[in-house]
Amino acid sequence: MNIPFLSFEYMHSLMRQQAIDMFTQFYDDQYYILGKGVEIFEQEYAAYCKTKYCVGMSNGLDALFIALKTLGIGKGDEVVVPSNTYIATVLAVSYTGAIPVFAEPDSATYNITAKTIEDAITPKTKAIIPVHLYGQACEMEAILALSQKYHLFIVEDNAQAHGATYNGKITGSFGMINATSFYPGKNLGALGDSGAITTDDPMLAQKASMLRNYGSKEKYYNEIIGYNKRLDELQARFLSIKLKKIEEFTILRQQIAAWYNSALSVIPEINTPTIAKNSTHVYHLYVIRTSVRKSLQQYLKNNDIGTLIHYPVPPFLQKAYSQLKIKKNTFPLAEEFAETSLSLPIWPGMNQEMVSYISELIMKFYKQRKSF
Ligand SMILES: *Cc1c(COP(=O)(O)O)cnc(C)c1O
């Protein structure tokens, strides 16, 4: 069996006719920038996140950047980010001129916690970016309490966790202003780059909306120095179609994860993710940890199973961030995760037979190692 790391085939076949009809309409409407498709999707996504406002953005990184800019974060400020996040979270902070300060994840959930964030807070800290990594919600109540104690903004990075909840409340609705990505591979993925911010605050929504569109409310009247970070009209129209299916797709992801969990939990050499009390996990990624990652990945590749590593180098050890002068072993958990994590295929359309096949290959791999 050949199982790719990601396939859109099942999801896209379900939406194929709708997508083609949508494209015909889009083509004929002849309104290609900030048309009614963007406006409709913004309303739908805000309703989905139970926030008052959504403002569509060009991609997840831009959404994070605009969220921080909207809050006035810049030079001289510090923003706390997870030590094991994707580089985009960190880059958004750098774009504003602020300094990213890293907080370690919890070894069981892989997410930052109120405790690890508190250790990173200084008098210069202005905001915290909790990342609901791999699809599991961070412990948002404790993090919110911490933000109140120190008067900090929360900006959720919800790129990997569309639909996840903490204590029944959906991610993307906790922070002052939150950012997400609709990169095609994300749970709610478009057919190209796109993203959004969500907020309950009308002033922040308006400022974010101006910043994304040349600093203007009214065409050709520019009130602030803005950017062009607009959500594309075609992507917005496709996202409206996919949003109607997101809950169905999430249930499929959770079913696949449950199959993996029960098959892999009998292998002591593998660490499978723990779900925290009160959190739900929407399984953007199914990440295991193993000390023999390289040979397991090669073995799976030889057997036509696609895997990826999220992520092989922590952001603070990337060449791009060498100016931070952070030495190895400063954030040992993030480094350990980078050395041991392996993401297995998880996409709507995978059936139990496929998960069993992959799980049995992994079991066979460990049995062979033992017999040496
Ligand atoms: C994908 C991702 C982003 C960036 O999204 P883009 O749309 O690719 O810019 C930011 N943060 C996290 C955690 C992500 O996974």
Image (cartoon, helix red, strand yellow):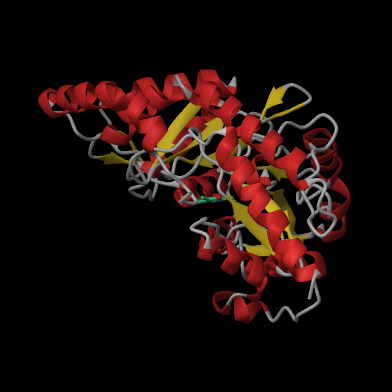
Give the percent coordinates (x, y) of residue 271.
79, 54
Give the percent coordinates (x, y) of residue 98.
61, 62
Depth order, front residue of 50/276: 276
Marks counted in the figure total 0
Q: Quadrant of residue 333?
A: bottom right
Residue depicted at 89% across the width and 50% down the height: 115
Give the percent coordinates (x, y) of residue 68.
57, 48
Q: Quadrant of residue 237?
A: top left
Residue depicted at 76% across the width and 70% down the height: 369
Q: Is residue 58 visible?
A: yes
Q: Is residue 76 visible?
A: no
Depth order, front residue of 87/305: 305
Viewed as shown, does residue 350 lie left or right of 192? right
Viewed as shown, does residue 232 lie left or right of 55? left
Depth order, front residue of 12/122: 12
Q: Which quadrant, please, contains the C terminus?
A: bottom right
Q: Is residue 345 above or below residue 231?
A: below
Depth order, front residue of 1/327: 1
Residue depicted at 53% across the width and 30% down the height: 203
Q: Quadrant of residue 209?
A: top left
Residue depicted at 71% across the width and 37% down the height: 137
